[in-house]
Amino acid sequence: MHRYGKRGDLIVHEEEPFNAETGPAALAEGPLTATDEFYVRGHGAVPEIDPAAWRLRVHGLVERELDLSLSTLREALREREVTATLQCAGNRRAGLIAIRDIPGEAPWGPGATGTATWTGVALADVLALAGPLPEAEHVGFDAADLSPEAKPPQPFGGSIPLDKACRPEVLLAWAMNGEPLPLVHGAPLRVVVPGYIGARSVKWLERIEVRSRPWQGYFQHVVYRLLPEDGTPGPGAGMPLGVVALNSDVLSPADGETVPAGPVEVRGYAFAGGERHVARVDVSIDGGATWSQAELLDDLGPWAWRQWRMTVDLAPGEHEILVRAWDSSAATQPEDEAALWNPKGYVNNARPRVTVTAAAAP
Ligand SMILES: Nc1nc2c(c(=O)[nH]1)N[C@H]1C(S)=C(S)[C@@H](COP(=O)(O)O)O[C@H]1N2
Ligand SMILES: [Mo]
């Protein structure tokens, strides 16, 4: 067992602040990720918040400022539930580090992602109470945790466009998979922005600011931005990440695994991000010369990944299994990780490949 009640098979990248990813076997267990297996990404110490004293302040470009208790939120507004995949922009960074080192950044494998059912109220309903003014274009979130990654330290936060904030799928959530939201996942209240990078799903939410321009803090204005290969992080450098790019990975068999020759079940996930959905997943065992379609498993709705499986027949020897997902905009994954390398190691959505050895029966 790790800290915060996390099961021992999580892969811990950092103890303090706690950063850990879900192991491939746990991700493959089903379309919903168990709460005690769900990855954790934190940039500072988990803050201690007294839920009874906690208030959500809504301010900025609004007709009415709000100061809401948790019970007011729960009683005044309609409860909503959304099943959504969270995916860190640094998911699969290890594949970029293999090309060229990225000092100071965790080598996340495929498990900085997971899917849960979130319960709370629509951010849109809170915004409707406050009444955004005509100049409003972005909605900023300020959290309670202070991160030493920014110099001087800054609270975590971020913003999303007002249009997205007014969509019914964007929640202020107090429950995860039907249980009270665990502290490490942002209790008492977190934002869940389906389709966007995990960083916008701000945990330990304290303030919502309706703004005319994006949030200017470190975690959106300096990092979580895609820099050109020769770029240097700095205020406003590169492009801000928002909508998640189409991605997939193989969860089983593991890279380097030896399996019995014959039929082998290959399993993985694919996530389209944004408003797109996964349309197809192809698998190749001949280096991409020919492809076969995987079976898409449970459809959990427009904001969740699709897990997939496919049985391939492997003769004795070494094989490379190559995968490419397609989304509803007919985009597929880029071939080459080397072409995606960037200084902070975000958005590795290259086609995943695993090498397995098929062993003949003795
Ligand atoms: N307050 C706060 N919110 C945060 C973070 C953080 O460090 N502090 N990390 C963000 C990032 S980068 C990701 S990927 C997700 C991870 O959510 P989880 O830890 O619940 O899996 O939370 C986001 N929200
Ligand atoms: Mo993240």
Image (cartoon, rainbow, N blue to C red):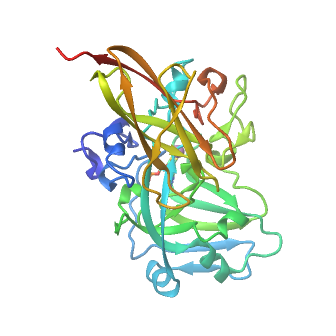
> Residue 258 is drawn in which quadrant?
top left
Residue at far right of view: 135
**Above or below, comparing residue 51 to residue 29 in the picture:** below
Instruction: Tally the numbered discs.
Output: 0
> Residue 163 is drawn in which quadrant?
bottom right
The picture places residue 208, in percent across and down from the top left corner, at 62, 67
Q: Is residue 325 left or right of residue 49?
A: right
Residue at far bottom of view: 76
At x 27% / y 39%, what residue is drawn?
Answer: 9
The picture places residue 234, in percent across and down from the top left corner, at 71, 35
Q: Evaluate whether residue 361 shows in this view.
A: yes
Q: Nearer the viewer, residue 123 or 130?
A: 123
Q: Nearer the viewer, residue 12 or 357?
A: 357
At x 50% / y 19%, what residue is drawn?
Answer: 286
Q: Evaluate whether residue 41 shows in this view.
A: no
Please identify the quadrant where the C terminus is shown.
Answer: top left
Q: Is residue 229 left or right of residue 354?
A: right
Residue at far left of view: 362
The picture places residue 105, in percent across and down from the top left corner, at 51, 31
**Above or below, comparing residue 142 to residue 174 in the picture:** above
Q: Is residue 25 left or right of residue 232?
A: left
At x 31% / y 18%, what residue is drawn?
Answer: 358
**Above or below, comparing residue 3 to residue 285 in the picture:** below
The picture places residue 238, in percent across and down from the top left corner, at 74, 36
Please identify the quadrant where the N terminus is shown.
Answer: top left
**Above or below, comparing residue 17 to residue 178 in the picture:** above
At x 31% / y 44%, what residue is drawn?
Answer: 26
